[in-house]
Image (cartoon, coloured by chain):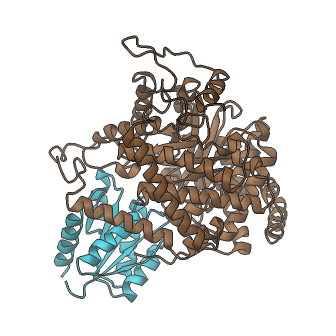
Amino acid sequence: MAGERILVGKVGLDGHDRGVKVVARILRDAGYEVIYTGLFQTPATIASAALDEDVDLVGLSMLSGAHLTLAPLVVQELRARGCTAPVVVGGIIPEPHKARLLAAGVAAVLTPGAPADEVERVIREVLDAAR
Amino acid sequence: MVTPREQWQQAFDASPTRDADFHTMSGVPLAPVYGPAEGEHPGVYPFTRGPYASMYRSKLWTMRMFAGFGTADDTNRRFKEIIRSGGDGLSTAFDMPTLLGLDSDDEMSLGEVGRCGVAIDTLADMEDLYAGIDLGAITTSMTINSPAAPILAMFVAQAEKAGTPRARLGGTLQNDILKEYQAQKEFVFPPRQSMRLVRDTIRFTAAEMPRWHSISISGYHIREAGSTAAEELAFTLANGFAYVELAMAAGLPIDTFAPRLSFFFNAHIDFFEEIAKYRAARRIWARWLRERYGAVAERSLQLRFHTQTAGVSLTAQQPEVNIVRTAIEALAGVLGGTQSLHTNSMDEAMALPTEASARLALRTQQVIAYETNVAHVADPLGGSWFVESLTDEMERQAEEIFAHLEELGGGSLLEGCIKGIEDNWFQGRIADSAFELERKMNRGERIVVGVNRFTDGNDSVGMDLLEITNADEQRQLQRLGAVRADRSQAGVDAVLARLATEAADPEVNLMPCLVDAANAYVSLGEIMRTLGGVFGRYVEVPVI
């Protein structure tokens, strides 16, 4: 995984940043290079940051209920710019919404309480599958 | 010399007693409080054991359930259901665009309208929100911070249109901007400009709204963001001292506004530590207000607080277990002497609560209030060697943090808190504590049932969740369009021009102009953009 780069971001108006910061540290400790966008990003700013930073994966933290609207837009913005990095969504995601996110091109969904080893495993699997 | 016991007795005798049978189930009569005559007593300085002598013997805590979703109409119906079910205070959750002062048709609002709370764009929404509810008879809490001043103005305007004068309005505005930069992160303007709006609301409510709590100084979000109990306690009280210094610097005598400050704490799952935290909070506040800030009025010294059970303790796995967690956390709040309480619903790790799960959460409080008899005796854990020692330890850790902030601020807690924000000191400590707790969970040192132990049953079928559809967003956009079409644009332009002029003069209180703006159906986004043109915007430099 040496050199693999992950962008973690907060899109929309959601200010809950505990989870994203904890996940950023977990991934950094696991050996990834982690870039955190900070709060209040749009799908377009996430996509351009992903391109600028040449990342291998984009992680979105979403706890305000806007995931069904915003996560697919992030995927679209990335693909429109020719970025193939897979997108993983973590946060308060009701079970029935998972399939809809996956159908919209999200690679994996993590929910509250996901332990660090599960986060690491899912990210690893998504990265391996994207090769 | 009058003993604390005698002081307590005098205050207790002057207090009303509610209609209840103050015996155990087996008939043992219960005294209102236990302890030696020279020891601490509730209602007696330093109030460690409770702000009032009679505590729940006079009045149970207010069962204040937080609600808000969709349009104002939807939330109005939920409010009426809460009142019908025996809830006796309203607590309003606003959606993300409202919390950030954006209109529903702002491009940043896409997908967020009505999701996490109710969408309020103009006075028209505020009118729908409280339609048919007697605001002179029930107290209302509004969880709003960056746009607290314009939202208060809309609230006052709608109440007065409905016939309740501002002086009769009872309730609480969260209005705690410092913890937004530290933890909750719903900020708009830079800290100093935001503090000017806080000062204006303190002045306005002190002069015109005697039943209103101008700020609810909130540790809840600090804890949810990952702090320890002692950090929650210390950061919150330090913010409280900062607001006191702010109002005193504006020339307000302390006893004119301190009685209207209230607090909001988390009730997490570490039962005794939480109780010790509440006890320490009351003692520290009383001592600092009297000794450092010269308060004399008893109500200035009495820390009163709202409690909410810990959202962050809820799990998506086996969500029914959340009912048990919430009950234990709620009990800690009650044994710690809270004045009001919100209990979370079991489905909140996945979505906003359904009506049925919110009712069950309220029932949890009712079991504690009416079946367990725990409310019969004030501070029942006072005098426990363990709880007293833990109370002292909370106080000691908090004092260490105050000393650090005081040094940072060159002797001023107000400057120390602002500097601590600008230097990312609070944010860094909270992130460190959150990560440390996460590591303990991952190493199995901290067990969470259904997450890292006892996971059988995690695959059981899901429960029905509240769905908020994009139809709510569409309805809200139409509503806002209709209001814009219907109002006098000349009136809007005039009041916004006046707002910009007044905002540029830091001596002016903006509240009267904001009430006029509300009455002209100026939208929240228009108000906040105008203020932003003068105040600028805050951009956080994130740390991980």
Relative to B64, B525 lies left or right: right
- Extreme-left residue of the structure: B456
Position of the N terminus of chain B, as image quadrant, is: top right
Relative to B177, B386 lies left or right: left
Q: Tell me which residue sits at (69%, 40%) in the image.
A: B298
Q: Which chain is brown?
A: B
- The answer to which of B301 and B292 lies nearer the viewer is B292
Q: Tell me which residue sits at (37%, 86%) in the image.
A: A51
- Extreme-top residue of the structure: B27
Colour of the chain lettered A: cyan
User: Could you say where residue A27 lies in the image, as x and y percent from the top left?
Assistant: 27, 75
Report which quarter residue B415 is drawn in.
Answer: bottom right
User: Could you say where residue B33 lies in the image, as x and y percent from the top left?
Assistant: 51, 26
Q: Tell me which residue sits at (67%, 66%) in the image.
A: B194
Q: Decide: is B205 above or below A108.
A: above
User: Could you say where residue B258 lies in the image, as x and y percent from the top left?
Assistant: 70, 48
- The answer to which of B490 and B348 lies nearer the viewer is B348
User: Could you say where residue B280 lies in the image, as x and y percent from the top left?
Assistant: 50, 47
- The answer to which of B391 and B305 lies nearer the viewer is B391
